[in-house]
Amino acid sequence: MAKSEPGATRRRGPNDPERRARIAKAAIEVVAQRGIDGVTHRSVAAAAGVPLGSTTYHFATLDDLLEVALHEAAEKNVHALKEWESALPPDADFAAALADLVMGYINEQYRDTVVEYDLYVAALHRPALRKASAAWDEALIAFFGSRTDPLTGRLLAGLFCGLLMQAALADPRPTRAEIETLFRRAIHGPTACG
């Protein structure tokens, strides 16, 4: 019986500890390129540059893969929202700030916005995704409510999400002034003349 060389013992455990995270990011990329219907274990494996067996090992079902992609997108958005909110001066014109935020999502971040809404809408037909989609809603309500009150925060969160979806689909897109007017009405109510 041959002796093994010193140090040649087989090490057990993952040899690519970042693989799961890469697969999750690749799932988001596949959604960006092909939509939800384009997400397969094979397409995600190709995008991640991993063997097919890696995707099925880490994510047994497509719902598992979509859920992690949605969590990843929600965490990224919540982090960005925290940064936005902490940089916003306490006396900022909140309606104007929200209009700027929407314009950023539908212009500079348009691709990410479409991916996130693809994943968000997928939760309508895939109950396993609903918990992940709720994280984004809860963060919006909390942030917007901290600048107004809890009920107005909920109203603004619904308006924000609706405007993002409508603006992403609209041609031409609404103007910043139109969006600001809607937020101003939601925050302050109708003016004396209208």
Image (cartoon, rainbow, N blue to C red):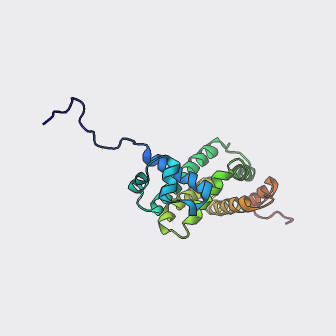
Residue at x-position 49% and y-position 56%: 42
Q: Quadrant of the C terminus?
A: bottom right
Tell which residue pokes out farthest to the right in this image: 193
Tell which residue pokes out farthest to the left in this image: 1
- Tell me if 85 is positioned left or right of 187 in this view: left
* Relative image position of residue 103 (x, y in whole percent): 73, 51
* Relative image position of residue 144 (x, y in whole percent): 63, 55
Q: How many marks?
A: 0
Q: Nearer the viewer, residue 9 or 103?
A: 9
- Tell me if 160 is positioned left or right of 128 in this view: right
Residue at x-position 21% and y-position 29%: 6
Tell which residue pokes out farthest to the bottom in this image: 125
- Tell me if 104 is positioned left or right of 133 in this view: right
- Tell me if 131 is positioned left or right of 91 in this view: left
Q: Nearer the viewer, residue 45 or 131?
A: 45
> Can the viewer see residue 48 in this picture?
yes
Q: Quadrant of the N terminus?
A: top left
* Relative image position of residue 107 (x, y in whole percent): 73, 50
Q: Nearer the viewer, residue 4 or 71?
A: 4
* Relative image position of residue 33 (x, y in whole percent): 62, 54
Q: Is residue 5 above or below residue 34?
A: above
> Can the viewer see residue 115 in this picture?
no
Q: Nearer the viewer, residue 128 or 10?
A: 10
Tell which residue pokes out farthest to the front in this image: 1
Residue at x-position 60% and y-position 46%: 80
Say which quarter of the image contains residue 113: bottom right
